[in-house]
Image (cartoon, rainbow, N blue to C red):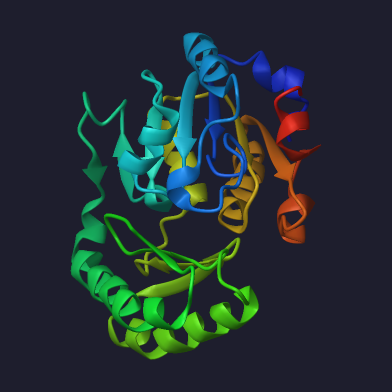
């Protein structure tokens, strides 16, 4: 198996550097719209794009992720891999994979239901719409665990009827298309698209687990790879188990 030593990976050419946003490039914010990059992150990303193929893989829609990062020269991959953009959306087209198109309307119906039924029940609930489905953020609810149970119970039957998939993140419920596309598949596409020899991926949440597992699979396939997890108090243990490097919090990560 190829070495996972980070200095070895960084010596590869072409090289890829791929990052999640929330909790990795930006602190976890009370609401999605309040998220902002860690100081100097944009500068580092600009520098990285000069010697590597730098990319963003996020659960946010491409347009939303690009709004936060706002660095040209990066590849923006959104909605867990369903969207792809070869630069900032203002100057580049956002591509939605064809398999996802049938789920645009079912996703909208579930989000409409959440706004009609759940928002009045759960104070502080935020409905974040994406090109396909979206996310229900209950971080600000008075009783987050109770809010989680209400959301999951309310969406269980309509999600099954509309053939949509329900998943979870940090104090959030994800409404997703029932496709096998995820951050891991998106990461492999990124590697193959740029014919990379080495790649480093950094993330912090449950949905980044697919990316960390794919880092291991790519290494088995002969690529030089390294996975970095930014650890927070609620980082899933499974994610830590698959990390090559664990960094304690954003401050330590950006001094890494």
Q: Is residue 71 visible?
A: yes
Name the residue: 20% across, 33% down: 93
Quadrant assignment, res 65: top left
| Percent of width and height locating residue 102 | 19, 66
Name the residue: 38% across, 90% down: 157
Q: Is residue 191 visible?
A: no
Q: In the rendered view, does 235 fall on the left or right side of 198?
A: right
Name the residue: 56% across, 64% down: 140
Quarter in which the C terminus is drawn: top right
| Percent of width and height locating residue 112 | 26, 74
Which is nearer the eye, 61 or 102?
61
- Asked if residue 53 is positioned above or below residue 185 in the image, the reply reads above
| Percent of width and height locating residue 241 | 78, 53
Q: In the rendered view, does 145 fall on the left or right side of 17?
A: right
| Percent of width and height locating residue 68 | 43, 34
Which is nearer the eye, 207 or 223?
207
Q: In the rendered view, does 67 fall on the left or right side of 214?
A: left
Quarter in which the N terminus is drawn: top right
């Amino acid at each position: 198996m190829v070495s996972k030593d980070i200095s070895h990976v960084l010596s590869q050419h072409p090289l890829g550097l791929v990052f999640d946003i929330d909790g990795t490039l930006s602190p976890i914010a009370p609401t999605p719209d309040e998220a902002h990059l860690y100081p100097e992150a944009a500068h580092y990303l600009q520098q990285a794009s000069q010697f590597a193929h730098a990319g963003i893989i996020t659960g946010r829609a491409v347009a939303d992720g690009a709004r936060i990062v706002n660095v040209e020269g990066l590849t923006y991959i959104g909605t867990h891999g369903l969207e792809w953009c070869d630069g900032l959306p203002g100057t580049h087209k956002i591509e939605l994979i064809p398999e996802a198109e049938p789920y645009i309307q079912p996703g909208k119906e579930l989000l409409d239901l959440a706004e009609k039924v759940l928002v009045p029940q759960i104070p502080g609930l935020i409905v974040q719409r994406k090109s396909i489905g979206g996310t229900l953020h209950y971080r600000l609810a008075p009783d987050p665990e109770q809010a989680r149970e209400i959301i999951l119970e309310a969406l269980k039957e309509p999600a099954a009827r509309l053939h949509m998939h329900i998943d979870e993140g940090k104090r959030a419920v994800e409404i997703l298309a029932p496709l096998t596309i995820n951050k891991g598949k998106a990461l492999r596409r990124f590697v193959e698209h740029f014919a990379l020899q080495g790649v480093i991926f950094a993330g912090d949440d449950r949905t980044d687990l697919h990316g960390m597992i794919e880092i291991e699979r790519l290494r088995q396939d002969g690529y030089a790879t390294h996975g970095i997890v930014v650890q927070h108090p609620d980082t899933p243990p499974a994610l830590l188990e698959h990390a090559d490097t664990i960094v304690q919090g954003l401050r330590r990560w950006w001094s890494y």
